[in-house]
Amino acid sequence: MSDFHCKEHDTDFFKTPKMKGYAHPIKDADGEPVLNEKGKQKWCNMADALPPAQEPGTMAAQPTAQKAPAPTSKPDAMSKDEWRDKDRAQRQSIERQVSIKCACEIASTDEPIEQILETAGKIAKWIAQG
């Protein structure tokens, strides 16, 4: 018996790559598919068959997953100043990357690298000024 077993229909749920979630076709006592009013086969979805605490994606629905113990202390959060420094460094990195890219696009193929870097520096200053 699978960990994903439908007690109501006494069959295992399964999931193929094209399916959004675990389900199984509903069959009658003779093993024939049960059809809906449109003539299509009825399916039992695992999310409909389980109580809310056991829906797929929750800890209870995962047979091998065990609930992690609650953290004993709150992890250190970054201060506003630390975030500001991090954002500033990231913004400067992006500005430098853009300036190098622009300078390379502007430069001809026979320009020396020093000339390209000088142009990139000017573009970076221009970007930084806003």
Image: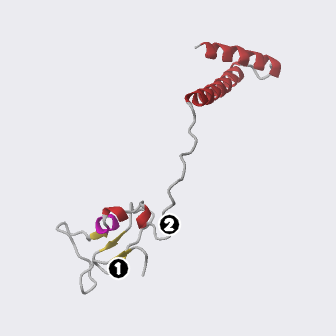
Residue 46 inside the magenta-drawn segment: yes
Nearer to me, 121 or 40: 121
Q: Residue at x 82, y 19 (%)?
A: 114
Q: Height in image: 77 above or below 33? A: above
Q: Secondary structure at mark 1?
A: strand
Nearer to me, 19 or 6: 6
Magenta span: chief secondary structure = helix
Q: Which comes before the other along the chain, label 1 or label 2?
A: 1
Question: Which quadrant of the figure contains the C terminus?
Answer: top right
Question: Which quadrant of the figure contains the N terminus?
Answer: bottom left
Start-end of magenta stretch: 45-50
Colour mapping used in the image? secondary structure
**Looking at the image, do the residues carrying marks 1 and 2 touch, with CB atoms under 8 Å apart?**
no
Q: Height in image: 30 above or below 6? A: below
Q: Amino acid at mark 1?
A: Thr
Percent coordinates x, y for residue 127 in the rendering:
62, 16
Inter-mark Cα distance, 1 to 2: 22 Å
Q: Amino acid at mark 2?
A: Ala
Residue under label 1: 11
Report the number of discs: 2
Question: What's the mark number on residue 65?
Answer: 2
Q: Secondary structure at mark 2?
A: loop
Nearer to me, 23 or 59: 59
Mark yes or no: residue 107 visible.
Answer: yes
Percent coordinates x, y for residue 19 in the rendering:
39, 63
Judged left or right of residue 110, residue 27 is left
Q: From the viewer's perspective, is the residue at label 1 or at label 2 nearer?
A: 2
Local packing at callout 2 (Cα closer than 10 Å; few below 14, some 14-19, many 20+) is few
Percent coordinates x, y for residue 125 in the rendering:
67, 14
